[in-house]
Image (tube, helix red, strand yellow):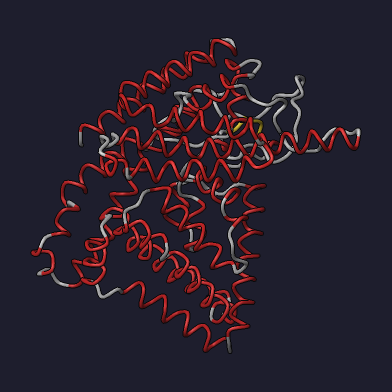
Amino acid sequence: MSPDELVYLGILAASIPVGFLFRYLSPPVKQGAALFLGLSITFATCHIHTLHSLVTVIGTWIIIKSSWRHAPALSLSWTFLYLLFFRLITWFNLPPPTPFANAVQLLLTLKMVSLANEVYSFHVEKKKEVSSFAKSPVIVGLSEEPSFYDTLSYSYCYIGIMTGPFFRFQTFVDWLAQPSPLSLPGWVPCLQRLKLVPVYGALFLAFNSIFPLAYVRTDDFLQENFFFRFFYMVVVFFVFRMRFYSAWCGAEAGCISAGLGCYPEKALSKPGGGPTVNYSCDPTVEETYDFKTIQNIDCYNTDFCVKVRHGMRYWNMTVQWWLHHYIYPNAPFKAYTLRAGWTMFISAYWHGLHAGYYLSFLTIPLCIAAESAMEASVRAKLGPRGQNIFDWVHWFLKMRAYDYMCMGFVLLKASDTIYYWMSIYFVIHIIAVFCIILGRVLKGGKREGRRGAKEDKSEGEKRENVNQKTGEKTD
């Protein structure tokens, strides 16, 4: 492990016992302590580069105070333009930020855009209440506009300050206002989330040492046979998953120990967004709670869901919620595949300026179009046994597609990514294009293909609604 990874590990490990101590604090003390601890971590790891995040917070607060009506669009523009400056800072003869400053800046960008949208919703609902003389039916909205201190304490809350998960300002306020945090579940869900972390960590260390990524960049790699080169991307993505499974499960445990994101099950919370229905707690009835609001990874469904589009839902789940609510609805396209492509482009930009991000993320819409075409033209015509076989083949190709795209994500450079993809003859791109063409031919034209994609999208939305009520198996 690198020195930076050891620092991340230390911060994650320390946040878990510290979280249990925060349950004993009153709301004002909890808010101040979370801010102090978060700023201390930021100053200790980012040094002078802490100014970047501070400027972002102040700029967003000024936007919200100056024009709440335009705050969502202006905050998105401001934070994303500052990300560009942040990543090109060496062009201005300024010192490059530390990796820790980059992590803080990424999470802060999500928070500031979300905060601007929450304040906008607060004012809109307030105006509706005044005009209709009725209480707004909005689900768990803000009760007042946040002050600068509130904004600062939310921005630098120590929980997930570098590793996530993302959570809304309303989630932060609910955490501070918990009436009896000591009575909320803690040890059991925390240990449940941590139980496989040692396994993930051991697998990461073992396979990372046996199959180093650097070998892909060597000339000797091309001398290996095709099947070895193809297999290498499978192992690289496995290492990638084990690394993030360990980190995100640990980060979730830090949230759980502090009680952040703890809501009654009847609130039907979603990762990142929190409760989706209005609810009230009955003191005479024993409530059952969950931490779905801060769930950032579903390891089981990431590995075993069938579709490419479903795989995205279970990976970095709180960020997916952010993209789905603040980027996807505002995409300048109407077609589902194009809107998905726009969302993936924004996600790539948020991650960084490396070409590998864009090559990887923009391959996702191609894979989605391919699976939609094949489902509409082939799967729909099969019987139960045939559909079962189709789904197993679909799952295998889904995993290979993510293996393939992961190489761009970790190699970063366009030359390295294309060098590797060329070594396996762009196999996933070729399969995807072939499936799209075959689907069109079998379905009988472009119009029918679009109908199949719409049906697939509708099926995915129905499945999501069912999962929200019944829950899917998680690790």
Name the residue: 49% across, 50% down: 314
Closest to the observer: 210 or 328?
328
Q: In screen coordinates, is 66 left or right of 105?
A: right
Report which quarter residue 287 is drawn in.
top right
Give the percent coordinates (x, y) of residue 130.
Answer: 87, 32
Closest to the observer: 59 or 224?
59
Q: Farthest residue in the front direction? A: 92
Q: In screen coordinates, is 423 left or right of 272?
A: left
Q: Farthest residue in the right direction? A: 133
Which quadrant does the N terminus fall into?
top left
Q: Kindly tell me whether residue 401 is visible in this rendering.
A: yes
443, above or below 36, in the image? below
Give the percent coordinates (x, y) of residue 434.
Answer: 41, 82
Give the percent coordinates (x, y) of residue 187.
Answer: 48, 23
Report which quarter residue 147 is drawn in.
top right
- Total marks in image: 0
Name the residue: 12% across, 64% down: 221
Name the residue: 56% across, 52% down: 327
113, above or below 394, in the image? above
Q: Kindly tell me whether residue 475 is visible in this rendering.
A: no
112, above or below 458, in the image? above
Give the percent coordinates (x, y) of residue 265.
Answer: 66, 35
Closest to the observer: 96 or 318?
96
Report which quarter residue 178 is drawn in.
top right
Q: In screen coordinates, is 186 left or right of 87?
A: right
Q: In screen coordinates, is 428 left or right of 273?
A: left
